[in-house]
């Protein structure tokens, strides 16, 4: 196993250009049928991902990060991503198309928090 290497957005590989922070959800934009995504649930510093991922950041004060992550991992959303991917052996979706897809969320932070607490209590 190789040790971790510290790189910056400017010194890393040309494809390592997307900065990730707490509350983001990263989604692989290639082979979308594999459902490769991750919610960043802790503070991290200097985390950069490849341009093969989209980094989705919730609007602070409007969208609860955890609820956005649940919505993005839903069958409905993943199937929309798959339907909008292009290619056969290496299907992919571009950021612009991915960001144009709709996600249904409760309209207030209070409702989102209530839903999150309900999901959390039922899945613990």
Image (spheres, helix red, strand yellow):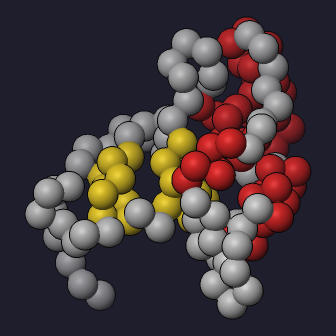
Using residue 73 as the reference point, say whether residue 96 is left or right of it. left
Residue 101 visible in the displayed image? yes
Work out whether residue 43 or residue 55 is closer to the camera in this orientation and state it.
55
Left or right, residue 38 beside residue 108: left
- The correct choice, above or below, for 23 with respect to 30 in the image is above
- Tell me where residue 35 appears, x and y as whole percent: 70, 66
Q: In which image quadrant can residue 123 be found?
A: top right
Q: Position of residue 30 (x, y in %)?
A: 59, 73
Residue at the spot 49% in from the left edge and 48% down from the top edge: 55
Picture quarter with the C terminus: top right
- Left or right, 42 with respect to 101, comes to left
Q: Quadrant of residue 71?
A: top right
Q: Is residue 61 above or below residue 94?
A: above
For the N terminus, the image quarter is bottom left
Q: Residue at x 81, y 20 (%)?
A: 106
Q: Residue 36, can we see it?
A: no
Residue 91 x %, y %: 67, 78
Q: Residue 69 at x, y = what percent?
A: 66, 42
At a point 51% along the width and 19% down the height, the residue shown is 60
Choose between 66 and 118: the one closer to the eye.
Answer: 66
Q: Is residue 105 above or below residue 42?
A: above
């Amino acid at each position: 196993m190789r040790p971790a290497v510290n790189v910056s957005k400017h010194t890393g590989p040309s494809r390592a250009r997307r900065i990730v922070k707490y509350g983001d959800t990263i989604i692989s934009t290639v082979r979308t049928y594999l459902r490769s995504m991750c919610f960043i649930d802790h503070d991290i510093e200097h985390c950069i991902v490849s341009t093969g991922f989209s980094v989705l950041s919730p609007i602070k004060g409007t969208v609860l990060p955890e609820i956005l992550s649940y919505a993005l991992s839903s069958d409905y959303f993943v199937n929309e991503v798959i339907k909008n991917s292009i290619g056969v052996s290496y299907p992919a979706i571009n950021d612009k198309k991915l960001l144009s897809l709709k996600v249904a969320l409760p309209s207030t932070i209070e409702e989102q928090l209530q839903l999150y607490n309900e999901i959390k209590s039922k899945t613990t």
